[in-house]
Amino acid sequence: MRWTLRISFLLFLAWAIFMVSPFVALYDLSKAVEAKDIDRITERVNFNALRASLARQILGQFLKTQDLGGLDPQTAAQAGTATLNPVLEELITPQALIDLLDDGQLQQSGGAAVANGLFFPLRFDAASFEKAWRTFILSETQGFRAITIPLPADEQKDRQFRITLRLSSATWRLTGIELPETLRKELTKRAAAATK
């Protein structure tokens, strides 16, 4: 009986540590963004997966605004990808990621910033614990290796960023950012301007 309780406790403890670990990784990423520590950001971000995530969103929004004139959607997507490459190159750098995650907007962006940035400062008071708990509750796991976290949790869904972290080699890494509608539209305008 004693061994059963000990094993149960150890399993529960391992599960609790695993459940909290992506939030610790996100906190570490927020500290790296705050300190503008490029090396730590590079360790915590899978830039190839992030590029694919942003390309899907921006390309989808871009193709909605274009007259395809009977063109095959796959061919249009390939052409759109070539067109969007300069915009994506601007986005997929550590400095651009710092700008985006720091205040919720890109440098030289006219859009409204997210209040207090995406990452809220961790303090030991009731409001911070409530915000952290809300973020934890609203997060969605995709199996044991991926989690999507809405930020900021107290914003409306259409103004939230959805951060996807994936477990890779015992490290949670940022692999995707679902952008709010306004930012996707702004990036689509940049892509359209780049084609002219």
Image (tube, grey):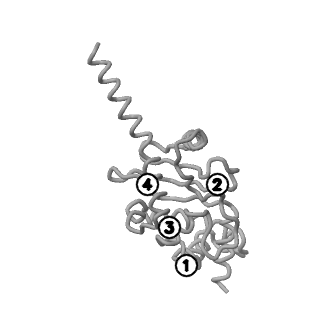
The residue lying toward the viewer, choosing from 47 and 115, is 115
**Residue type indicated by callout 4:** Asp
Q: Secondary structure at mark 1?
A: helix
Query: Upstream in the sequence, badge 2 or badge 1?
Result: 1
Q: Is residue 85 left or right of residue 61?
A: left
- Give residue 9's position: percent from left, percent from top: 35, 25
Residue 103: image quadrant is bottom right
Can you identify the residue that label 1 sits on? 82
Q: Residues within 10 Å of mark 3 (few under 14, many from 20)?
A: some
Can you identify the residue that label 4 sits on? 28
- Give residue 112's position: percent from left, percent from top: 70, 65
Mark 2 or mark 1: which is in front? 2
- Give residue 55's position: percent from left, percent from top: 55, 68
Identify the residue shown where x is 44% and y is 41%. Answer: 20
Can you identify the residue that label 3 sits on? 51
In the rendered image, the vertical position of residue 96 relative to residue 141, given as above or below: below
> Spatial distance from mark 1 to mark 4, Cα to Cα?
34 Å
> Spatial distance from mark 4 to mark 3, Cα to Cα?
21 Å
In the rendered view of the protein, which quadrant contains the N terminus? top left
Mark 3 or mark 1: which is in front? 3
> Spatial distance from mark 4 to mark 2, Cα to Cα?
20 Å
Asked if marks 3 and 1 touch (Cβ < 8 Å), the reply is no
